[in-house]
Amino acid sequence: MNAFLLIVIIFGMTLQQVARKAYNIRVTGGVYSFSAASALVAALLFVAVSGGSFQFSSKAFLYALAFAIAYSVAMVFTLLAITEGPLALTSLIISYSLIIPTFYGLLFLNEPVGIWLLIGIFLLLLSLFLINWEKKGEKKTITLKWGIFALLAFAGNGACSTIQKVQQIDCSGRYKNEFMMIALTISAVVMFLIALPIEKKQLASNLKQGFLWYFLCGLGNGAVNLFVLVLSLKMPASVMFPLISAGGIVATVFISLFVYKEKLSIQQKFGVALGTLAIIALNL
């Protein structure tokens, strides 16, 4: 059962990245409206799963508020990073963010530390070096702006996963649906309010043109968050998140290279491969 849930999570992560890339190709602008609409779709998925039952908890609400902030940062800057740079590299950097809850599990949940952790960290750092190394004369595929966007997406995504893990432990596995419904709804409302003055006349057009892509992105996001919450009490964080990350990297990089025909230098391709090995090593 755990293996099936992991496959669904990896598929959902890949679906989100592909939907963002497709939206970026077909629609100009609309970062905040896309993020808001995706969050709303994900929230509605949790409403459907809940079957209408709702239990309120002030503790769960505080976690939901923290998650809403991290989620908004992750959604907005992931889309901006994909706009500025390659999908493959953006996906890799964001996948690295799952090392944040991994380290949380090691530091605060007394999960074991082994030699593979050190090897994984070394490979990860080497991967980052190769990704950012471009020879003179080569066409630049990444920029400082992309780096900033990817870093913020990394931080937001890692914070989301960590908050989910802590919430489920602190609340003894309760309030999954309530936690996510509140968090995603807050995020959707805030980002819609930001979109109103920024996107103005383009808002309605962006929502209409991007319907399929924000629907798929929200569906994938809702499924990922739902099953991460389910698995968070069944698997150690230091095992679950590296598995999810490695699977997501392989699937998204394959699509970016063979479907979207993105061009990466030899060093960057090697960096992606090392990054995948780093995530796998962190799981051993």
Image (tube, grey):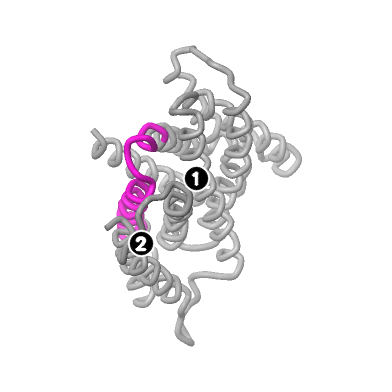
- Residue 261's disc number: 2
Q: Is mark 1 on a helix, strand or loop?
A: helix
Q: Where is residue 2 in the image (x, y as percent from the top left)?
A: 26, 36
Would residue 190 be found to the left or right of residue 216 on screen? right
Q: Which amino acid does label 1 sit on?
A: Thr
Question: Which of the image's four quarters has the C terminus?
Answer: bottom left
Tell me the crowding category of disc 1: few under 14, some 14 to 19, or many 20 or more residues within 10 angstroms, Cα based: many
For residue 187, above or below residue 94 = above
Would residue 257 be found to the left or right of residue 27 on screen? left
Q: Position of residue 110 (x, y in %)?
A: 41, 50
Q: Give the range drawn in magenta.
A: 229-258
Q: Say if the magenta span includes residue 42.
A: no
Direction front: furthest residue: 110
Would residue 59 be found to the left or right of residue 93 on screen? right
From the image, tell me which residue sits under label 1.
162
* Foreground: disc 1 or disc 2: 1
Q: Can residue 241 be seen in this view?
A: yes
Pick whichever, 113 or 163, lies toward us: 113
Considering the whole magenta stretch, tell me its main secondary structure: helix
Q: Where is residue 65 in the image (x, y as percent from the top left)?
A: 63, 34
Q: Earlier in the sequence, mark 1 or mark 2?
A: 1
Tell me which corner region of the image, top left, top right, bottom left or bottom right, holds residue 67: top right
Q: Say if the magenta span includes residue 233.
A: yes
Count of picture labels: 2
Tell me which corner region of the image, top left, top right, bottom left or bottom right, holds residue 8: top left
Tell me the crowding category of disc 2: few under 14, some 14 to 19, or many 20 or more residues within 10 angstroms, Cα based: few
